Amino acid sequence: MSEQRDLYEVLGISRDASDADIKKAYRKLARKYHPDLNRDNPKAAEEKMKEVNVAYDILKDPKKRAQYDRFGFDAANAGGAGGAGGFGGFGGQGGFGGFGGFGGGSAEGFGDIFDMFFGGGAGRSSRSRGPVAERGADIRYDLELTFEEAAFGKEVELSIPRMEECPTCHGSGAAAGSSPETCPDCHGTGTRRTVHSTPFGQMMNETTCNRCHGTGKIVKNPCHDCHGTGKKRANHTVKVTIPKGVDNGTRLRVSGHGEAGTNGGGYGDLYVYIFIKQHKFFKRQGNDVIVEVPVSFVEAALGGTVQVPTLDGPVDMKVPAGTQSGKIMRLRNRGIPFLRGSGRGDEHVVVKVLTPQNLSSKQKDLLREFGELSGDKVNPEKKSFLDNLKKLFK
């Protein structure tokens, strides 16, 4: 750099920029000139990054920044910016010096770059944490109900096979009179860390401890019931209230009745899925009930009262004279109760007029006489259909 550019211009910030603005601008440029994003011209990116490092090293330091603002670059850079090596490590040019090179040799170099590329400090803060408590797995249970049970609800008692906390050792995994010991390999953290040298410098890798399998504890004298696992399979009994109005596929959540957790984590949840048996008479449509009721030819023609099945028991329904097969009649508030809120759907009765069969000679004669006396009145719809058919082919 034969001619020193204005450092604020290099970072793309104003002279009254805050410390946070300076750091944000630096991170943005570090990403921009990262060698993985500039494979077509790595040397140019390296030179740009060197310039950015110098500017950042001075402006992030309040004393150096004040000297630069008053006396210029030479005064602020007295003693050297220190190790602003850019990305030289990639091209064999030297001077990168690991992640510290980004910060111009600053003490915060690794931390800044770790935050920049790996999401900000999570790796470092995790060092102080122990094994993570994990909630137990959820359990699914498929429950079959009758049509009426689904409509009006009920309380059921379910037996659920699941992993529970061992009642003998109370989940510790250790036999009576003993207790788990802190894992000597991970010192109770449940994880082990290894450091690897990379072109970027030293990188830390964190894995689950092989000795304690992430628990942070070693059980030297295991419980004879659970063999040191702290869990035991058992049949768990739970009462579940099925609300009125559930339908096929309804899912009910019962909190805390799933599998046992680990490292002090709570139990998972139980999910009950509802399946409804097919009914002999009723069909469901939303909250309405559909039922087909047979009616004799005489009842349909002359009218009368027929008995209709409902969810509440049989009721009498009037059939008007001249009712046609397929006519739908409604019985209000005889359907499925609403799952949320009050009220019920309706029952829709589909009338099915039965044609008489196996007639005696006298019955046949009477019907023929009835037909002759009625003429076209016996089936006005048929006469209308035939008239329209004649017009179509005329």
Image: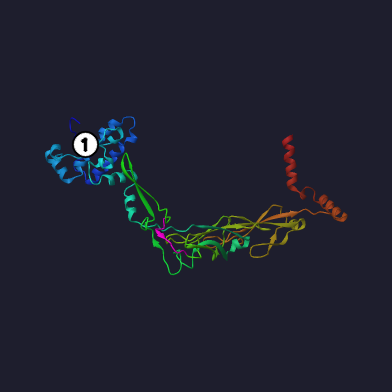
- The answer to if 215 sits in the magenta stretch is yes
Q: Position of residue 177 (x, y in %)?
A: 43, 69
Q: Secondary structure at mark 1?
A: helix
Q: Residue at x 88, y 54 (%)?
A: 361
As rendered, which of 74 and 146 lies closer to the eye?
Answer: 74
Q: Residue at x 73, y 39 (%)?
A: 389
Mark 1 crowdedness (10 Å alpha carbons): few <14, some 14-19, many ≥20:
few
Along the horizontal axis of the image, is 216 left or right of 10?
A: right
Q: Can residue 285 be seen in the rendering of this structure?
A: yes
Q: Can residue 12 be seen in the rendering of this structure?
A: no
Question: The magenta stretch spans which residues?
Answer: 214-222
- By what rule are the colours in the image chosen? rainbow
Which residue is identified by label 1? Answer: 9
> Residue at the left extreme?
71
Q: Position of residue 162 (x, y in %)?
A: 53, 61
Amino acid type at circle 1 is: Glu
Give the quarter of the figure containing the N terminus. Answer: top left
Q: Position of residue 199 (x, y in %)?
A: 32, 39
Asked which quadrant contains residue 262, the reply is: bottom left
Along the horizontal axis of the image, is 286 left or right of 294?
A: left
Give the quarter of the figure containing the C terminus. Answer: top right
Q: Residue at x 27, y 43 (%)?
A: 24
- The answer to if 310 sits in the magenta stretch is no
Q: Position of residue 295 (x, y in %)?
A: 73, 57
As rendered, which of 286 and 188 lies closer to the eye?
Answer: 188
As rendered, which of 184 and 115 lies closer to the eye?
Answer: 184
Asked which quadrant contains residue 112, the reply is: top left
